[in-house]
Image (cartoon, rainbow, N blue to C red):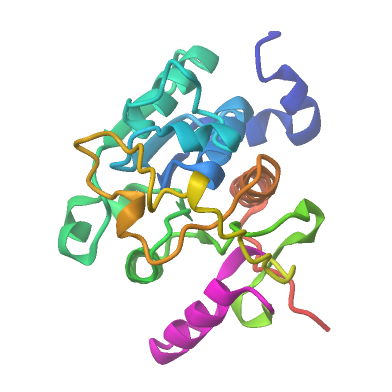
Amino acid sequence: MLDQFSRTQLLIGKEGIDKLSSARVAVFGIGGVGGYVCEALVRSGVGAFDLIDDDKVCLTNLNRQILATRKTVGKYKAEVMAERMREINPNVDIRIHKCFFLPENADDFPFEEYSYIIDAVDTVTAKLEIIMRAKAKKVPIISAMGAGNKLDAGRMQIADIYDTKVCPLARVMRYELRKKGVQELKVVYSDEIPTRPIEDMSISCRTHCICPPDAKHKCTERRDIPGSTAFVPAVAGLLIAGEVVKDITTGYHKAKKRR
């Protein structure tokens, strides 16, 4: 019977569609990368999601986040994304967690229920905890490295964390994961040398903060405010979604090692 996933079924078959429909994917971080992950996965037929993010849409998100429009500014990202996903597939099952993931609240998340985990958060502490929890439960996970301060979307690629180079966040993650005994981790990263943001106080969040008054994590509290584009985080999110669909439908594949 013809339905909204018929074109995808032509490529992955009915069995593949069924596997996606029965999968529950957790997306930690519904921003520039995570939003495109959600968009592509719900359009691919993934049947259930946990969306984890405590942030609200800001005016400065409009340059890159698929969920950000003038109408959604000031609304919780997880709620906005969930509404958009339900407009694409009314039957999708979505659980919203309006919170910032930390080691202190990690027990609140049913990692054992997830078919796949996407780490699209910004902080090293949260990323490490998500990864370690996923490894402990033997749940497939893919982690997003830095997409900020990049201009060449064609440099984004899938790799094992220990084969990454150039990316400052990946360097920190390699060091921390090696200490924890993690032997492999699939990531999306760019080997582009980061561009140094222009220091222009007239457009800086440092001096012109427009975060909602009740925002829990304001830009002014960040050590660095990276520059961003519409295309680099989007490509990262779509690459992640492609890996997730491939892994769910054909069995988990480790990232290819560089020769």
Taking the view exactly as shown, the residue that stands out farthest to the front is 202
- Left or right: residue 230 versus residue 102 is right
Most foreground residue, 249 or 258: 258
Most foreground residue, 169 or 188: 169
Image vertical order of residue 254 relative to residue 240, above or below: below
Image vertical order of residue 103 relative to residue 218, above or below: below
Residue visible at 68% across and 65% down?
Answer: 195
Image vertical order of residue 39 relative to residue 209, above or below: above
The quarter in which the C terminus is drawn is bottom right
Residue visible at 48% across and 22% down?
Answer: 85
Most foreground residue, 25 or 34: 34
**Magenta segment: does it hold 168?**
yes
Q: Which residues are magenta?
A: 166-189
- Residue 182, image x, y percentages: 46, 82
- Residue 13, image x, y percentages: 73, 31
- Residue 39, image x, y percentages: 57, 31
**Magenta segment: does it hold 27?**
no
